[in-house]
Image (spheres, rainbow, N blue to C red):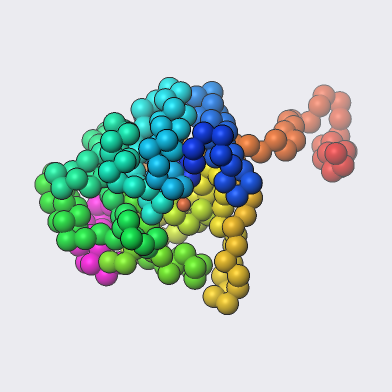
Amino acid sequence: MSFKFIHLTDTHLACPGQTLYGLDPRARLDAAVADINRHHADAAFAVVTGDLTHWGEAAAYANFRDAVAALKIPYIAMVGNHDRRRTCLDMLEAAPRDGNGFVQGTRQTPHGLFVFLDTLDETSHAGEMCPKRLGWLEETLAAAPADRPFLLFMHHPPFAVGIAAMDDIALKQSAEFAELIAPYRPRIRHLFFGHVHRPISGSYGNIPFSTLRGTNHQVAFELDPKGEHLASHEPPAYGVVLVERETLVVHTHDYLDTSLRFPFKVPEGMDERNYALSRAAP
Ligand SMILES: [Fe+2]
């Protein structure tokens, strides 16, 4: 059986009752939690890769905490550029913490060490990994047994994804980060991040990566650097990750989608072609 976990990101909770860009972030997180409970209560845990709140108030973290308290599985809460580190640590026991006060930590699993990184710079929307955080990462990777793989989680991508407005606020120390992880690349099975509010996958120096839409608003698809940077109401999603020895599969689920479901199986006595054609019209 696969090792299953959930990837959630960019929940952007405000204070209870507040809407954000015309959407209710609490209601949309509640819906994600309910869907996960209904279909994936067998997952080991959920990882929320940052931007838990939009403005970082204690009341917004309480709102987040109340919503995810309904999860039937444990969760790990990470910080993004919209978060506030001290408030997050004070409000959420599920936020990991390293010896320097950063929201960093690890979790051992049957398929390797999950490593959670803090890329928050409270003075900027761009990502930061200062020498202390990079040092923690180096020690953590070096301390793991040489035959153990890693899965990395961070809010900011450590490379450009091709959407100029988001690339401007990616991880500032991309070169230092790449150099640090270079000796470990063959052992890094996957990199998960948030921040870009879009479904994107690919590879980065031979490391597979994926990210997905947030649970509230999204970033519109725009590859023209002169194009306008727009937000959108594209549907929210969460990821379901199935890990085995040789494979790691990421399913992205649009959990609010209510489009038609119907059987592929052709009803008894009906021609396959007629069935397919009859399904063309709603
Ligand atoms: Fe975000």
Chief secondary structure of the magenta portion: helix
Image: 138 above or below 97: below
Q: Is residue 163 visible?
A: yes
- Compared with 158, 110 (above or below) is above
Percent of width and height locating residue 60: 44, 38
State yes or no: residue 58 in magenta: no
- Circle count: 0
Residue at image coords 43%, 69%:
168
Nearer to us in this view, 143 or 166: 166
Which residue occupies 72% across, 38% down?
259
Quarter of the image containing the C terminus? top right
Q: Nearer the viewer, residue 280 or 253?
A: 253
- Residue 273 in view of the camera: no
**In the picture, residue 232 is in which quadrant?**
bottom right
Residue 128: image location, x then y, percent: 29, 61
Give the magenta-colored segment's residue range.
174-190
Q: Position of residue 72 (x, y in %)?
A: 43, 22
Q: Which residue shows up at 36% across the image and 27% down it?
A: 74
- On screen, residue 228 versus residue 168, left or right, reads right
Dividing the image into 4 quarters, which one contains the N terminus?
top left
- Residue drawn at (25%, 63%) of the image: 177
Residue 216 screen position, x and y as percent: 55, 44
User: Looking at the picture, does residue 6 appear above or below residue 268?
Assistant: below
Quadrant assignment, res 57? top left
Q: Magenta span has 183?
A: yes
